[in-house]
Structure formats: C-alpha cells, structure tokens
Amino acid sequence: MGAFKSYKIYIKPGFEKISSILNDAAKSFINLIEESPDIKDDSILNIVYGGDGTLIKAIEENKYKGYFISIKSSNSLGFFTEFKNINEFIDYKENFTPFIEKHKLLEVTGNNKTFFCVNEFIFSNPYATMKFSLAINNIPFCYCASNGICVSTPFGSTGYNHSLGGTILLSNDGYEYNIIAPIENNLYHNSLKSICLNENDILEINMENKIDITIASDMKVIDFGKDCTNFKVKKTNFGFYLVHLNEKNVYNRLRNSFAMKEN
C-alpha cells in the first residue's frame, strides 16, 4: 500500500493569482486520499490547474512519469480533467481511495536519437508530397503519398488525430496512425490510411523521396538530422498516471466532451 507524501502545483499561464488559494486547498485535499496498492509509496501528487495542454506540459516537466490530477480552468479544453472548476476542488471534503489510470507513451527512434510523446508524433510537409512506405513488425505493409502521417496514443486520440478522422481509442492499449491528406489516384491507393495497432507492434516509416519534413512531438518540433529517413515507433514500457476520485465511465467522458453538454 502506498500514499502521497506531498504535492506539486502546476498553473496555466495567466492564472497565477489563484496560486495561494489553490495551495491552501491542496493541503487539505491530499489528506483525503486513502492508501492504495496502485500508488508507489512516498509519491508526489501533481495537481494541474488548466486544460489538457497544461497537463501535457506538466507531464513533460516530470520526464513523462508521476501521478497527476487536473482541475479545469475557464476557457480550457479538459477531456481528462477531474474537477470542472476550482470551486469544485476547494469544496471537495470526502475521503476516497483513488482510481489510478495508467497511460504509456509513444517513442520514436532514428539516427540513434529517441523522442517521446504523450499525444502524437506528426511527420509532415504541407507544401510537397511525401512518399513513404510503412512496415509493421518488419512486414512491409503499404506505400503512401501524402502530406504526412500522424501516429497517436490512446490519450491523444481525441485531439489532432480525431480531427483527421481518426478513431478515438477507448482503452489505453495499442495506438494508431492516420495518413494526412493522402493522394488518391490510379498510382497510389491509400486504402490503409488509418489503422489501429496492437500494444506491442512496431511501426516503421521509411521515407522514399528526399524532401524536407517537419517532425513534431505533441506539436513541438524535434530534430533527427537531415539525413534521417528511417523511423521506428512503438509504445514504451513506462508512462504516467491520472488520479481519479472513482473509476471513470469512458462513454460519459466522451459524451460530456463531444456529444452533449455535461449534466
């Protein structure tokens, strides 16, 4: 059985004036959390005030590890936030055994460099056609001509991936890729432009034409060097944890964020 020994606060830029109020509420809140076998002893609870973007920044600053609970700020997108606003967090007074939700990262390697992402990797050139082949577990899979490819975690599947027409992954297993603006003609058949992969699958991306591409991790540019044309993507064995008051119904979460206003 483990428990949180302390907490750390992350606040969305522009809301620093609430830091003292949030700190006072956090002192009381952390004492409400019961011991749990899903918590490593003497862990730190990272309390995030903002939206999903602030949550991702906090995860990155913690080297993609640790426990996080999120409070939605005004004018923020909060698919993974636990509290709808700061008043709800301040007013919460019940002891609870937390439900811990684990999320693994994606990693991409190339030119002996490795980068990680919480949401997605994007390989793109919006002004020229990228020609590349894909292999899964060393098996040649398909050939693509498009403006790029997005490879997303389940955590990130509700974001840019979904705007491309990608599937929202309800469980935390596996990951997916989506081809960005594929060319469709009698030379290129991108019928496999969106695929959900298994947890242990390795996706290999091989660039076939020499054009400049931009590679981004969670919308931030990363650099493998100009000569890198081969990339391998897979799930990591480690990750971060979201802390909830109770077990979440994924369909309620989807409904409240996409389909209907929350009751």
Image (tube, helix red, strand yellow):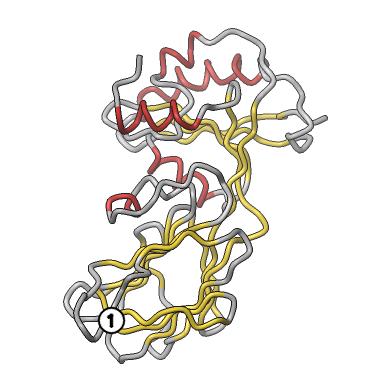
Q: Position of residue 153 (x, y in %)?
A: 48, 54
In this rendering, the answer to whether 166 lies above or below 85 is: below
Q: Position of residue 154 (x, y in %)?
A: 49, 49
Q: Position of residue 31 (x, y in %)?
A: 67, 16
Rendered residue at 31%/33% (across/down):
258
Rendered residue at 59%/76% (across/down):
137
Residue that badge 1 annotates:
130
What amino acid is labelled 1 in the image? Met
Q: Position of residue 138 (x, y in %)?
A: 58, 81
Residue placed furthest toward the left = 127
In this rendering, the answer to whether 79 lies above or below 220 is: above
Rendered residue at 75%/28% (across/down):
3
> Is any part of residue 63 visible from this angle?
no
User: Quarter-wise, where is residue 99 in the image?
Assistant: top right
Asked if residue 184 lies left or right of residue 243, the reply is left
| Number of marks present in the image shown | 1
> Is any part of residue 199 visible from this angle?
yes
In this rendering, the answer to whether 60 lies above or below 71 is: below
Frontmost residue, 5 versus 106: 106
Dot 1 alpha-carbon crowd within 10 angstroms: few under 14, some 14 to 19, many 20 or more? many
In this rendering, the answer to whether 194 lies above or below 76 is: below
The secondary structure type at the circle numbered 1 is strand
